[in-house]
Image (cartoon, rainbow, N blue to C red):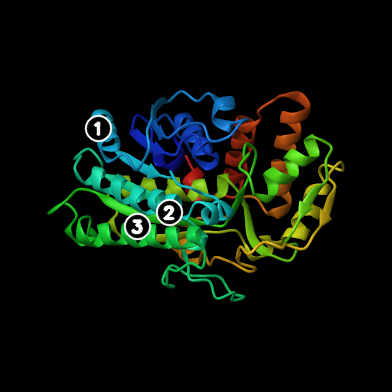
Amino acid sequence: MDKLFGGAYKGKKVLVTGHTGFKGSWLSFWLSELGADVVGYSIGIPTDPNHFRLLKPKITGVTGDVLDKKKILETIKKHKPDIVFHLAAQPIVRTSYLEPIKTLETNIMGTANVLESCRQVKSVKAIVVITSDKCYQNKEQIWGYRETDAMGGDDPYSASKGAADLVAATYRRSFFYPKDYGVKHNTLLATVRAGNVIGGGDWAKDRLIPDIMRATSRRETVVIRRPKATRPWQHVLEPLSGYLNIGWKLLEEKTEFADNWNFGPDESSSLSVEEVIHHTKKHWSDIKYSIENDSSDFHETHLLKLDSTKAHIGLKWKNVWGSDKTFEKTVNWYKEYYKNKKCVTSKDLEEYVKDAKRLSIEWSIT
């Protein structure tokens, strides 16, 4: 495992903000398997149950808020990471309507605080800022958004992610300009965006898959309010392989990769909410659902897709699992947890890497 991504992470000190969240816990675990010395920075445990607690990865944990400028700077100064993956955020669209100021502060100023702290610590050679596919100004178009499309957002969450992306772009141009690398600075910065990420261990509220799994475990019927809303669905390991891929290139001092990158699923993985229900029922027949009209005033996007051509060509990155395998692995993870109290994350990661090797994907070749 430690030879993946060119062995770039073996022995490296890596800081992951938001390490106790869904994606953060998967990323921290994978990094530890790659031989990295991982330090996590998070405000606390966001859910109960919690994937990070189940995994118990061998990492150093620091409790802190990204809005605490002093604490994040002290943490980076103390641990002197080679690379920082910034995931800490308020990640839920509906919550952003209830807590707009907190969402904007956390996602925008939290990002600025992390970048400013990195700027003051010379050990940091690479930064990967994780935003969202919702950072784009969504026009409900049928084709995917490219990295050159405009940032935007009609809801507080989307606006916060678009703004976070702009903050990262500002730091890249002002302080970490790739053409000045090795002369005026020694840090490379990239931003990455993914689609609707699913997989075992997500227990966040107001997310489709966690809502389905929770309801089914209690023998309840899950209520679906926007059955026609269409999203690009991908297993959590897909974008993480992209993030790690970019980090690898930045650590190798390849300045052309200090840019914006989409890591979305294939076209066939853009499915409506109701289609997702049917996919999950194939693997857990106990799933029951009902459709009700959404009477809330919250605006949510009906159609959103990413174009990942740049990553396909520039990074030779591609998806390993199609939608069928993605839903199979996701549902079976929850079934193992709820029926047998088992956490099969390690098994899923091993299978994912083996499948990537069979496809001869560049990052998996050792």
User: What is the three-letter code of the residue carrying label 1?
Assistant: Glu
CB under 8 Å between discs 1 and 3: no
Residue at 65 percent of width and 68 percent of height: 302
Choose mark 1 or mark 3, whichever is in front: 1
Position in image of residue 319 (x %, y %): 58, 54
Location of residue 142 with respect to 23 vertically, above or below: below
Mark 2 → mark 3, Cα distance in angstroms = 33 Å
Choose mark 1 or mark 2, whichever is in front: 2
Identify the secondary structure beneath mark 3: helix
Position in image of residue 226 (x %, y %): 72, 62
Choose mark 2 or mark 3, whichever is in front: 2
Q: Is residue 211 left or right of residue 32?
A: right
Looking at the rendering, which quadrant does residue 349 occupy?
A: top right
Mark 1, Cα crowd under 10 Å, few <14 / some 14-19 / many 20+, is few
Q: Residue 101, labelled with which disc?
A: 2
Is residue 317 visible in the rendered image? The answer is yes
CB under 8 Å between discs 1 and 2: no
Q: Residue 74, labelled with which disc?
A: 1
Q: Residue 257, labelled with which disc?
A: 3
Mark 1 → mark 2, Cα distance in angstroms = 26 Å
Residue at 60 percent of width and 34 percent of height: 350
